[in-house]
Amino acid sequence: MPIVSMSLGPQILRKFDTVARRRGYSSRSEAVREAMREFIDAAEWGLEEGENTLVLSILYEKEAPRDQLIQLQHEFHEIRTMLHTHLDAVNCLELLVAEGPNTRLKELVGRVRRIKAVKQIKFMNTAANL
């Protein structure tokens, strides 16, 4: 197995190690491999055709201009609902529900990922016709 080296800040490494221990991983490498699998799964939905319903949570810095998210709402008519909440003095959470073609929803997620102030994105998708 290839060995990969990376640089991390001490705070994120401490948090990562704490979560890995709590989840019962036997090593940091095992936890990183699992995190990478989840990252790849999220990036490659595997759904090229058809329609989906997407629930997207976006954690971002409060001081960042929110107009980029609002612009996406006007550009992507697939977005049915947006909910904004303040988490603390620094962070905001935006929840989106979108319905439409999978290719368009993937484009939406990609555009959100490119917004600099976005710290974390999580999403859940399901076939709209279930």
Image (cartoon, rainbow, N blue to C red):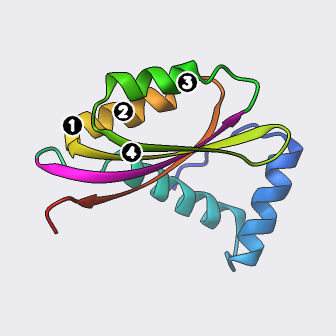
Give coordinates of residue 114: x percent, y percent.
51, 24
Tell me how far mark 3 sits from mark 2, CA to CA. Answer: 11 Å
Q: Earlier in the sequence, mark 4 or mark 1?
A: 4
Front one among 75 and 27: 75
Instruction: Give amino acid for label 4.
Output: Ala
Can residue 42 be seen in this snapshot? Answer: yes
Mark 4 against mark 3, which lies toward the viewer? 3
**Residue at the bottom extreme, as displayed:** 24
Membership of 53 in magenta stretch: yes
Instruction: Give amino acid for label 2.
Output: Leu
Would you say the residues marked 2 and 1 are in contact, meaning their CB atoms lie under 8 Å apart? Answer: no
Give coordinates of residue 113: x percent, y percent.
50, 32
Q: Which mark is residue 43?
A: 4
Q: Earlier in the sequence, mark 1 or mark 3?
A: 1
Instruction: Give amino acid for label 3.
Output: Ile
Q: Residue at x 61, y 57 (%)?
A: 32
Q: Earlier in the sequence, mark 2 or mark 1?
A: 1
Front one among 16 and 78: 78
Tell me how far mark 1 sits from mark 3, CA to CA. Answer: 19 Å
Q: Residue at x 69, y 80 (%)?
A: 24
Tell me how far mark 2 sits from mark 1, CA to CA. Answer: 9 Å
Q: Residue at x 74, y 67 (%)?
A: 19
Q: Which mark is residue 115?
A: 3
Q: Is residue 50 left or right of residue 26?
A: left
Q: Residues within 10 Å of mark 3 (few under 14, many from 20)?
A: some
Tell me how far mark 4 sits from mark 3, CA to CA. Answer: 16 Å
Q: Which mark is residue 103?
A: 1
**Magenta segment, which residues?**
50-61
Q: Which residue is mark 2?
A: 108
Q: Is residue 101 left or right of residue 7?
A: left
Q: Residues within 10 Å of mark 2 (few under 14, many from 20)?
A: some
